[in-house]
Image (spheres, helix red, strand yellow):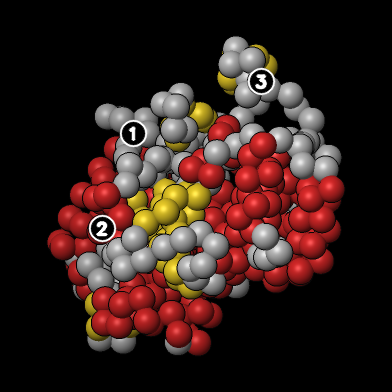
Amino acid sequence: MPPGITAATASGKRPSPADRRQMVRVLVDEMRKFDANPMKSQCLIIAERVVRQFPQSFADMIEDRRIGGGYSSLLTQIKVRVEHLNRNNTLARLRSTKCSTGAKQKTGPADSYGCTRWQPDIPPEETETTLEMKKQRVMEFYSHEGLSGIERAEIQHLMAETYYLQRKMINTMPAHSLEYIKSHWPYLFIPRSMCIHFETLTDINVLRQLEASFEEYSKIIMEFFKQKPTNDSVKSVLIRSKTCVTAPYVLQILMAHFKEQNEALLLQADVAASAADVERSLTLPDSPRLIVLGPVEETNRWMVSIEGHVVTEGESFLLGLATLFASFYNFNLQYQNEACCTLEFIQRCFIGINPERGYKAYQGKIHSKRTGKEVKKKTSSP
């Protein structure tokens, strides 16, 4: 160890940043003699032991108060050093999901498709340590106030400032489960936060864009299909809708036109059901679903499920649709095959994401809706 570390630990003082960085380099070099890419859980053991043995020199403190376990900043430095030494590994996302047919889908380099800040650089005025301290502040609020803490302006500000850390965790390879991410960033799964994260990621206000697009195009779409119903499913939606022109009917008529089942995107549950009730009563797929509570055309209450669990809920159908759509981009998920045409239509025509290259939908072989045979998916937009 550098002399500065030896002197600091002996006197119970804080080492200089340069000495601390050198200590981290020595630690990681020793760790990598046994494992070239130690996991975070293994790094955690080292960080905890260092802080336990020398708390005055290395524990995370604000004035005289220890922050959390006191080891977050040291753990971050160790893990960042490990990742730096293994930097030839790609940052491409490899989250695997399952569609309702049981076939696996993989996301890959196209995860950044349509994004402008998929993995930003650390803000120039911040360090990993200062951002981790802000994250700890967020978790302290959550432990005392629960999800209602998001109403505080300070929490909203801290969530915006820690966007770099949020993306770093989401983009980690191999991918963390959504349950794991939620345990570290609970406020990220509130509808408003999901929409804000999407706006930072893509420069698009997804809810405002959906509201404006549905207001502008709903009547045009419904009138078009009244004059030229493309199949019996479209006719059935038109009969149910009568003269109503609402977002739920527009969404259903688009899915009918593309010969996609409602269940590929929308699930229905009892109007009084809780999240636990929904998880018990419905078989929730891995890919995102919008769960409406009560009749699709009448209710405003909804939930969004991902990876078989309800991750958020709220009111207003368009907010639910915005939250559902944002989840694909926020968490690097591909569109499920069973609803990819409708989702691409929403992406391109309603949201306005039209990159020249790449697709958010799976591009391998799929089952033809017309013949039932396995065919290569077309790469043109719907």
Q: Secondary structure at mark 2?
A: helix
Checking the image for residue 370, the label placed there is 3
Residue at numbered disc 1: 32
Q: Quadrant of residue 57?
A: bottom left
Work out whether mark 2 precedes mark 1 in sequence or the reverse, and give the earlier one. 1
User: What is the C-alpha distance between the residues marked 2 and 3?
Assistant: 36 Å
User: 49 or 186: nearer the eye?
Assistant: 186
Q: How many residues crowd around disc 1 within 10 Å: few (fewer than 14), some, or many (20 or more)?
A: few
Horizontal side, residue 109 vs residue 269: left or right:
right
The image shows residue 293 at horizontal and vertical percentages of 41, 63
The image shows residue 204 at horizontal and vertical percentages of 72, 63
Mark in front: 2 vs 3: 3
Checking the image for residue 277, the label placed there is 2
User: 18 or 373: nearer the eye?
Assistant: 373
Horizontal side, residue 49 vs residue 8: left or right:
left
Q: Secondary structure at mark 1?
A: loop
Q: Identify the residue shown where x is 48% and y is 54%.
A: 290
Residue 253 in view = yes
Q: Quadrant of residue 255?
A: top right
Mark in front: 1 vs 3: 3
